[in-house]
Amino acid sequence: MEQVVRPGPQSYYNQTGILEDLDQFLFNLGYEHVVCVVDKGGWYAVEPYLQKSFEKVAISFIDFGGECSFAEGQRLSQRAKEHTAQAVIGIGGGKVMDVVKLVANHLIIDYLQIPTIASTCACWAPLAVIYTPEGHYETVRFFNRTARSVIVDPRVLIQADPKFLVAGLADTIAKWYEGRIQLDNMARTPNLELGYQAMKICYEFILKEAKNALKAIQSKQINQAFVDLLDVIFASAGSASGYAGEYGHAAAHGVHNGLTVLPETKPFLHGELVGYGILVQLVLENKWDDLNELLKLYNVLNLPTQLNDLNLTLDHSHLNDALQAMCEGEKLMQVVFPTITTQDIFNAMKQLEEYTN
């Protein structure tokens, strides 16, 4: 497997109040014209903390269309070009973070990220998960250009629906389970070791701090566990992806990719589907002790453990379409289970249903 190091942003801030002087911050970076791509929830989240006016930097806001697709990237690129933008800023969730990478790399300009939910490491990692305009998973695109800056204000993220933090914790802890199965029994280069240790940090901090962080976001009272897990979801998970590269994705994400072909999974977040995928992967590995440990965490976080939690059943008329998709495309299942079949995955799902009933 090709080993490419894709480091993180040039700067990362996890600082209360940092958005209050965004105008000066952008001016200090040398920008005169910037464009912000914003989803609806993102704007409501940051508006109370942004300056009422920008005096030093001309800033324009463009609404995000809803899916990180190649078509949306082209549309937003044209809009940013019309505004002669020197940089594009993503404000919102993971799909906004990803689509601005398409724009920045197409126009060869800087990009900055202001996440308003902690559901993935998208603000950090120089890659984009691409979907069709209808929301079906399509591919992953890697970039050489990294973010100029990631700007995290805990006051913004503490206001989010707790489900986004929960999804972020599931997507982040998947780095450990998907990376470990590939890296445990191989000679690791120094760069892979950095990625491996970052994966381990994700796992250890989430097991230790998830309960307290969840209490924080439920009560809307920032605590150290919450601040720490923002760093874990963004920086630690992003570093794991950056240094361990393709070793950070395996069967759990393969399950996610297949499930997205079913319309019933549309309401669920990326991390919720990946979280279910971890359980399927552990059954396939026959790692029942690890499964038991993870189920305790899922009980605290209320993550899906059965198909019914995802509006699906084993006898769903199109479940086989999802199973086929898991085995095709980028073949993430085969990364760790080279001879796997759709029947193997179905059997693992069935075992999981029986075990968690």
Image (cartoon, grey):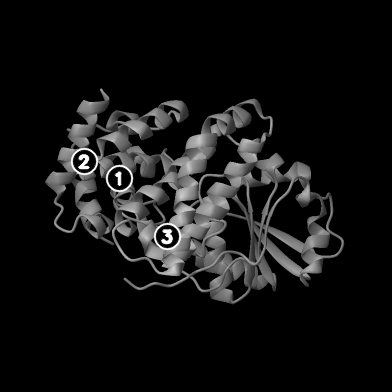
Per the model, the C-alpha gap separating discs 1 and 3 is 15 Å
114 sits left or right of 264 in the view: right
Q: Residues within 10 Å of mark 1 (few under 14, many from 20)?
A: many
What element does badge 1 sit on? Answer: helix
Q: Earlier in the sequence, mark 3 or mark 2?
A: 3
272 sits left or right of 163 in the view: left
Q: x, y (%) of residue 281?
A: 27, 45
Q: Residues within 10 Å of mark 2 (few under 14, many from 20)?
A: few
Per the model, the C-alpha gap separating discs 2 and 1 is 22 Å
Residue 318 in view (yes/no): no
Question: Which mark is on residue 259?
Answer: 1
Q: Earlier in the sequence, mark 1 or mark 3?
A: 3
For the N terminus, the quadrant is: bottom left
Nearer the observer: mark 3 or 2; the answer is 2
- The residue under label 3 is 130
What element does badge 2 sit on? Answer: loop
Residue 15 in view (yes/no): yes
Nearer the observer: mark 2 or 1; the answer is 2
Taking the spot 52% from the left edge, 57% from the top edge, the residue there is: 238
Tell which of 249 and 311 is nearer to you: 249
* Residue 346, quarter of picture: top left
| Residue type for callout 3 | Ile
- The mark tally for this picture is 3
Tell which of 123 and 192 is nearer to you: 192
